[in-house]
Structure formats: structure tokens, C-alpha cells
Image (tube, rainbow, N blue to C red):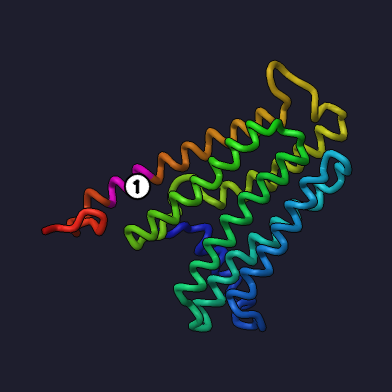
Amino acid sequence: MPNPWRERLDRWLLPIARKSPLTPNQITALALLINLTAAALLSQGAKWPSLFLVAPFLLAVAGIMDALDGVVARERGLSSRFGDFVDHLADRVSDCFLVAGWAIGASVRIEIAVVMALGVALTGYAGTQVEATFGIRSYEGLGRGEFVLALVSLPLISFSLASAGIMEANYGPFTIPEYLALTLTLFTGLGVLQRVMLARRLADGDSRPSAAAPVE
């Protein structure tokens, strides 16, 4: 189930992929390192708000590299199951650390941050499990692209709030970053629901017996 924007990005990256001296796994590892660096910078945003402006740039670079590794693998015939595993694992590690880093830097209370991180992890897991179970990689609904877009936006909003001196001010029961974290949590719940519905549709069209329930 292709995504037209992803296909367009792949075409843009094709000339770079043909000249890249790095293997797909090396690109994946470098993207992970950049994301972890961004997470560390985000976690210090409360002390140095300007770091909220640096992190989105790193996220954008890592996002492009996350797409580039697949283009390199296909263009140079280096696709492998291990590489696909490493790519998925790196995405899940990046997602969890990035959302945790932003929550720390934006002074989001721990119980909200934990639920948000769990929602992000479950959304990624559900998408990966659909692919593992049905052999279909689907980009429909809310996915990692929307999550990365949110993580580019949230630090910019946090910088504005910190500059105005209102990042930790309560408006009702929560601060503005906490409202944003709760909103992201709701969207992750929607993302999981979309993947459950996709799995249901795929299962309804699949006549093969389940491995979990062998036919005697």
C-alpha cells in the first residue's frame, strides 16, 4: 500500500543513493545516532531553550537518512531481512528516546510522559506486526511520518513557550506541553486502532490457516 509522498521522496533520493559510499545498515546506524543526539538535546531544552531549535534540524536529517537506507538497499541490491529488522528496531528506539527527550525537556509530568511513550511504542509495534503477520507494509493512516512531523513541531512550540516564560505555567490542570503530549497520545491510540482495523480487513481476505491455530 504505497504512500505517494514516500515514492516521491524515494525518487528525489535516488541520485544520492547511487553515489552513497555507505551501506544501508551503516546509514541506518548513523540515522539512529543522529536521533539519539537530538533526543539528548531535547532533554536539556528546559535549561537551554535554544536546543529546541537545533533538534528539529537533526530530526529532519535523520528522517531523510531513514528513507535513504531503503533506496540504497533497493538500488544496489543490498536488501536483506536482517537489514529490514535493523531498520525497524532503529525506528522504535529512536521514537521512544525522542519522545522521552522532548517530555523531559518540556517538563511534562512523568505519568503523562510514560503513557505517551507507550502509545508511540505501541503504534510502531502494531504497524510492524501487521507487516510480520500479513507480509504487507502499509503506510495508510497515522504512521511514523506524522510522528516525525509532530516531533519537528513540538520543539519549536516549546521554544516559543520557553521564550515567553510560560512553558511550565498551568492552564487548567495541565501545562501547554502536557496538553500537547495528551493530544499526541490520543493520536497514537487512533494509529493503533487503524492498524487493528487494517489487520481485521487483511485477515478477512486471508483464507490461510493461522500459525497460532494449526489445523488438525
**Secondary structure beneath label 1:** helix
Q: Which residue is mark 1?
A: 198
Identify the residue at horizontal 62%, vertical 49% (top origin).
96
Asked whether 118 or 17 is in front, the reply is 118
Estimate the x, y position of residue 171 in percent, counting from the top left.
Answer: 73, 19
Identify the residue at horizontal 50%, vertical 64% (top origin).
7
Q: Locate residue 154: give its quadrant.
A: top right
Q: Is residue 11 left or right of residue 22?
A: left
Asked whether 56 or 169 is in front, the reply is 169
Q: How many marks?
A: 1
Query: Quick check: is 160 in the magenta stretch?
Result: no
Q: Is residue 53 left or right of residue 173?
A: right
Estimate the x, y position of residue 187 in percent, counting from the top left.
Answer: 53, 37
Q: Is residue 194 left or right of residue 158?
A: left
Identify the residue at horizontal 64%, vertical 31% (top origin).
111
Q: Looking at this rendering, what residue extends furthest in the top direction? A: 172
Q: Which residues are magenta?
A: 196-202
Q: Amino acid at mark 1?
A: Leu
Estimate the x, y position of residue 142 in percent, counting from the top left.
Answer: 49, 45
Identify the residue at horizontal 46%, vertical 37% (top origin).
190
Q: Magenta part mainly helix, strand or loop?
A: helix
Asked whether 19 or 113 is in front, the reply is 113
